[in-house]
Image (tube, rainbow, N blue to C red):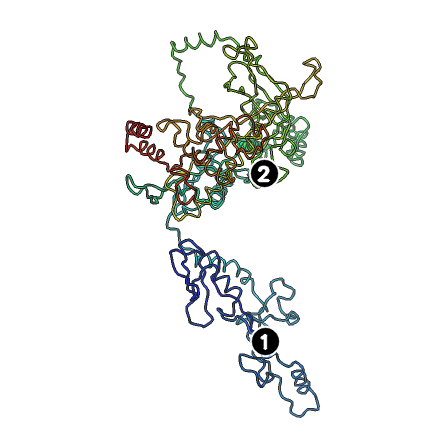
Amino acid sequence: MMAEYEIISQFTEDAYAKEDRICDRPVCRAKIRKGDPCFYVATIEPGQPGRNVCAPCYSHYKKNPATSVRPTRRTEQLRPFASAQGSNNDRVAPDMRAIQQSVNAAQRKLTINPPPVVAMPRRTAGPDIMIPTSWQGSSWQGSSQSTGPPWPGQGSSNGPIGYSSQHALYATERERWAKISYATPPAETILIEISAVHEGGGRKKRGVPIGNICEGKKGIDAQIDAPGLIELALDTIVPKLQIFGGGFLWRVNEFIVRDSAWVDLSNHRRSVAYFYDQCQQLSRKGSKTTTFKSRQFALMVIVPETQWIEYENWREDAEMNAARIGQRPACKVITPQVPSSVQSSVDLESELGTAQTNDGATTSDNVRSNILPTTTVTTSTKRSHQHTHSSSSFDIPSPPRKRDVAPAALCSPDRDRLKEVLRIGGGTNLDMKQVFGRQSERIHFYLVPSRPITDLLLDKYHSFSVDTAEWSMGELIVDTSPQGLIGVGGFKTAHTGWLTLMAPPKIGPGSVAHDKIVVKRPYHKVFATPTTTTGPYKIARYSLVDELSRLFKEANVLYWAKSLLKLTYDFIDRCVASSSEPPPFPIPRVRFVEGGLALAYFQGDRKPGGKTGSTRAVFLLEEFIDSDGEDFVKFIHNMDANPLIDYDKYGYDLAVFFSFTQHIQYAKTGKLAFISDYQGSTTLLTDPQILTHPSVSDGHLDIFGDGNIETTVSQFEKEHICNKYCKWPAFGLEVYTSGEEEDELEACADGEDGPEAYADGEEEREN
């Protein structure tokens, strides 16, 4: 019978080579590159060194363990009953019948001098397990801890039989020592300052610090990801916050961890280093290689505003109760001055304590008011209860008072400035157009979801649909006045609006009450005469059917654009993670605005033939882009696959990156589609277009709307100029053009040549 084997390797199987090496398996000798899986396997011969092998060889050893590893347990055989012809390596199972006959003969009473029955020693993979019936009489009988065998020095009648309570920690200790043995201390570390703040203080201030809760952490691994940072921040701050809050029960699951730029860490991917890229700097001026430099970063544990208000109310109630208790001490009664009738009332008070009465006062207050006249009554502005102070017969200490703060000196305002403000403030009239221009709508809001491209391949999610989208009822206020008009595009108008939903989502439009948004509606121009196409015109709305059709296509384009952009970043992240070197350029992070369709309904017979509750209008609602002074830029036009703006203009670098994303989308979709009309700020984009190859439409019109210029896709390989992003080897993209023009533009941007040199190059190419 063959012995059973198990492979002897390291504790964890996720080991990787720290440097290039050769597989130790003689028949393989493959090269194991730095960062590739590398496994250590022990040999079958004791005392011989093990082997570091590649992943295919490790799989081979796992399938054929007898060729490479030592046995861990053997089937024991009794030599007296083994086969005479069998060698040590060719043993057979013991003859159980012969054993039984031997035992019976030894125990037979008529046998003279029966041979003793001796237990043969037996090797096992672990300690022997005691029989539960032998625990009788032990002090551990019936205990849940006596579930194993005795260890050396245990098992006597005087001590417990089986494992002790310390053995229950074996698995935890084994895991801890395994991590210590195989985890080297991080060579690249950062410093993190963690503080606690609560929401409030206005938009610019963002948050208000809570007490002096701030803790520094040094020696943090620079490769730590966002979930690790969240766990570190909460473990550091929550205990201090509990001490600060006394007995208040904090809801830790509602806390948000943000960095110094007010970015929510919960929205970032796992296993991607969060701060590592910011620690990279150029080795020297003009060099493209980078080195790591440790830096200090800040994290904040944010307590939501609603929870902070609850804490303040709780603290105020606690202070009130403490003050009330301080005003109710045991009464010091002077017996000779108190009549007997009053004495019985005092005795009654001692029995009743401070029971509550119907009018809000306590029984002790009523008793005191019957004994002696009340001299003063003080009323709190925060609570409708009264404190009564009796005469000197009762020694009642006053409640603890807060430290008196000296009032600030009264400064008179500047006279000239006050005159100017009085003139402006007193002469201001109400803007009737702005007030009457606010239009209230009762709506159903359908959010445009974000789905991966794999979901879009399913029949259920081919396009945006109100049937599969999350929706909620709410109220929309649109500012239709001239002050509320954000802009008029070629096809749509944009107005300021405010959205309130009954079931608000976690993110996106309507996530907070009175959320400021952009309200878009399509329009067409009406000129003075039907034959005129230039000059002054009026804005006219489409019919309800046409309006719904046009805005549905806009929402569907946004739906596909968000999916293609997610596909792009997934590709970039995978390539960067698998590369041995970081990219020689930063990767911008942008996203499209969150948005959705809003169907408005009649709120009464406001129009002849309009039935209450029927659909009246359709709006496209989008997240408001607060650019903080940045310009609204159109980076790429839908008729070209290259940057729309010049190399020396604001946003050119981002436009080059968007051209690179088109290259990825073109390649990953099998040369069928990519995003165009990149426009917005440096972080938020809006109004995209989806361009498709002519083979997609197959003669059908109106694929992704009028903005789908199919020739841009069919001519992409000829027109697109590959840039530094496209040429990085880790991305593995096919270079469609030489990119000489892009190289010259980058040289101009770096200051190597001026615009005159670029102009000369253009002239030479034209000649």
Q: Nearer the viewer, residue 183 or 554?
A: 554
Amino acid type indicated by mark 1: Met
Q: What residue is pinned by disc 2?
A: 456
Mark in the foreground, 1 or 2: 2
Asked which quadrant contains residue 636, the reply is top left
Q: Give x and y (percent) for residue 373.
A: 61, 23
Q: Is residue 495 visible?
A: no
Instruction: Give neighbour class at mark 1: few <14, some 14-19, many 20+ (Cα, 10 Å).
Output: few
Amino acid type indicated by mark 2: Leu
- Helix, strand or loop under label 2: helix
User: The C terminus is located in which quarter?
Assistant: top left
Q: Give x and y (percent) for residue 62.
A: 52, 64
Q: Nearer the viewer, residue 676 or 197?
A: 676
> In the picture shown, does residue 672 fall above or below 686?
below
Q: Give x and y (percent) for residue 689.
A: 52, 29
Q: What residue is pinned by disc 1?
A: 1
Residue 98: image tag: none
Q: Nearer the viewer, residue 744 or 388?
A: 744
> Pointers 1 and 2 in contact (CB under 8 A)?
no
| Outermost residue to the front | 767
Instruction: Give neighbour class at mark 2: few <14, some 14-19, many 20+ (Cα, 10 Å).
Output: some
Asked which quadrant contains residue 385, the reply is top right
- Helix, strand or loop under label 1: loop
Sequence-first tag of 1 and 2: 1
Q: Nearer the viewer, residue 574 or 528?
A: 528
Q: How many marks?
A: 2
Q: Is residue 152 visible?
A: yes
37 lies left or right of 306:
left
Determine the CA span between mark 1 and mark 2: 56 Å
> In the picture shown, does residue 103 fall above or below 519?
below
